[in-house]
Amino acid sequence: MILLAISVLGLQAQELAVYQDPSKDIETRIDDALKRMTLAEKVALCHAQGKFYSNGVPRLGIPGLWMSDGPHGVRAEILWREWRQAGWEIDSCTAFPSLTCLAATFDPDMALLYGIAIGQEAAYRNKQVLLGPGVNIYRTPLNGRNFEYMGEDPLLSASMCAPYIKGVQQNGVSACVKHFAVNNQEWDRMSVDVEVSERALRELYLPAFEAAVKQGGVWSVMGAYNKLRGTHCSHNDYLLNKILKQEWGFDGVVMSDWDATHNFREAAFNGLDIEMGTSQRPDKGIKWDKFTFNESYLGNDFLKALEAGEVPESIVDEKARRVLRLIFRTGYSPVRHTGNQDYEGHSAVCRKIGSEGIVLLKNSVGSDNGKPLLPLSGWIKPESTILVVGDNATRRLTENGGSSELKAQHETSVLEALQKEYGERVMNVDGYSPMPERLSDQQREEWKANDEAKRLQTILLARTADVVIFVGGLNKDGGQDCEDSDRSSYELPYRQAELIKEISEVNPNIVCILMSGNAVEMNWADRTPAILQAWYLGSETGNAVADVLTGRMNPCGKMPFSVPFKLEDCAAHSFGKIAYPGIDKKVEYKEDILVGYRWHDTRNLPARYPFGHGLSYTTFKYSDAKINTTGNKWAVSVKVQNTGKVGGKEVVQVYVGKDGSAVPRAKKELKAFAKFFLKPGESKVWTFNIDPATDLRYFDEAANAWKTEPGKYTIYIGSSSTDIRQTLTAKL
Ligand code: BGC
């Protein structure tokens, strides 16, 4: 009876179809699946069917794709059609340090560790795509999303993003490198049209994406919101078809940024594979409350155009093939990755990366004991008192910031960690606090009076403390390192600079800890003996900071971007509004190839803290630099010795400059770096390989090709982009 019913319904026990057979290779399975699919089923693969979901082939049992932001942790679940959190109670995560912190480690092994851990959490939460890493180049300190990116140098971003991607993908979860490309500001991000020279595009803005594809083997790429040379990047033929797919041989999926699709023909023809996040169709008068996902540009319109023969079927076949490939690589892979949510293990990863990424910007003698203010263990006595000041000492900085917001399973604040460390000797006061929005006039006056009282109380307490730990910076509120809003000023917000100066007048032992993903104006820096750049460090914020403050961890992070003295010293701000934020929704990258330290160096315009800068509790001596130019590659070696009293890691940086170039070039560019540990007194000879064919080349626009100039080159080896300890010359 049962057998009869089963056969009537056509549900006989069957052999595995080719597409289902895990022993067959992916391309054979995809061919088979495609043959079985209707046109409508293929079209359905090409657009979202939920805020973070895109279709599989339900009839064939091929699963869809669940996606999640990225890039710092697996985001909490979001409602199906709205941007609010779904209110689940099993969707918390480990919040990893922001990508600027990861970049500041200058250590690709840290990126691999990060990728593995976050990929495990994504797999455990049943995600097939993790929306990260972000690799847009840091062009202006006002960009609200720099904290999600890896700084101003293409080699650094490229070296760090590839292992992150490999780590994520070894869990059967696709990384999705974003935002392709030139998404370097949030101002007018949906519409701004970027005009950038081909040379700057190739030399600065594309290398990290290329590394994501070629070295990282990334399975998906997210198009950017902005336009490049007149066409939106999420359906830009030049970027997606010509460069990404044809030139670089990318075989994965291009998805749009959320709501970044604007035009049916471009979406169909220009290389977009999955349209995500469309929530209305202004061209058809469909507002978000009436919109259903099938009304996406690559939904019903696409199907109709295919049926009418207006779009060749090969177009949908190509997209469907790529989407299937992504599904077969992830959720439908023969290997079932379940990942894990090992909070303890992942917290350790967090703490490690956080403490390796913190940058000691400055460390000089505080009051009168003749010792540098940090580490505290160097001078602090059992009876010494510590005053912790500042809103960021207690604020949950894993929240807010836009799509990278996280529901962290835990977040240890700096105050908590220092209390654990030093107990009752720790005093705390807010010092300053952000003014809440939407206050009535009277409330505003009351708030100001209260704030004034807090400041006074801070100064009184600061007089009595042995050391003041000021924890400030930005905070991921709108306009303070947050998606969709650039900062409106370079200054520290909430009158923090004023407070720091006032405190320093009554207590010279002040350590300033900046939490931010951006450079800030530091006209107060001369008043403070010690400054730490501590990013956003995620779940283990307090512990990572305490590790460095106490001296348990010898700081070894290096700045992934320059900190200009003033905003106008930054290249993007040197050419008026047309270069930032743009005029009439057009922005011209007039500084061309001279971004970050390339600009400061070439224009002899010192930065307050240069790219690559970061101090240690020990000192390193460089000597015996040598170069061997026989063979295809140049071998550059240098001896580094730890000359201090504690063990520590140094990041040795190798820059190369072309003397007397026929074309404008930066004075020098980072070409290699290495980070290693040395015990006190220990020395190591490190050898770097420079490949003239790829490392010395520039992009020749007239020839539309890379060129390597013969002649003399200078090799600069140092501890930062300006702290050059050894130079060499070589001839090509
Ligand atoms: C952001 C992306 C993010 C997506 C999904 C967009 O607004 O630009 O980075 O992945 O939303 O949340």
Image: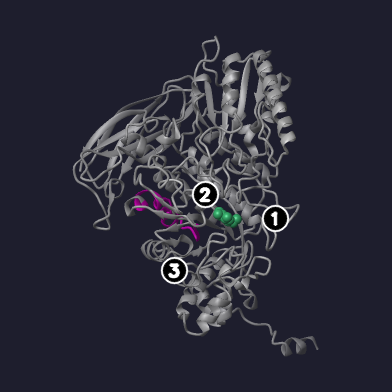
Q: Is residue 206 magenta?
A: yes
- Report the front residue among 253 and 34: 253
Residue located at (40% from left, 34% from top): 569
Estimate the spatial distance between the alpha carbons at disc 3 and disc 1, rounded to whole Å: 32 Å
- Image quadrant, ligand 1: bottom right
Q: Earlier in the sequence, mark 2 or mark 1?
A: 1
> Is any part of residue 234 visible from this angle?
yes
- Report the front residue among 100 and 127: 100
On residue 84, the disc is 1
Q: Which residue is mark 2?
A: 186
Q: Secondary structure at mark 2?
A: loop
Q: Earlier in the sequence, mark 3 or mark 1?
A: 1
- The stretch of residues the image draws in magenta is 201-225
Some atom of ligand 1 lies within 8 Å of the CB belonging to the residue at label 2: no
Residue count near mark 1 (Cα–Cα under 10 Å), binned few <14, some 14–19, many ≥20: few
Q: Which residue is mark 3?
A: 270
> Is any part of residue 552 visible from this angle?
no
Q: Residue 562 location in percent, x, y?
A: 43, 35
Q: Earlier in the sequence, mark 3 or mark 2?
A: 2
State yes or no: discs 2 and 1 in contact (Cβ < 8 Å). Answer: no
Q: Is residue 422 magenta?
A: no
- In this view, 178 is above or below 561: below
- Name the amino acid type tagged 3: Asn
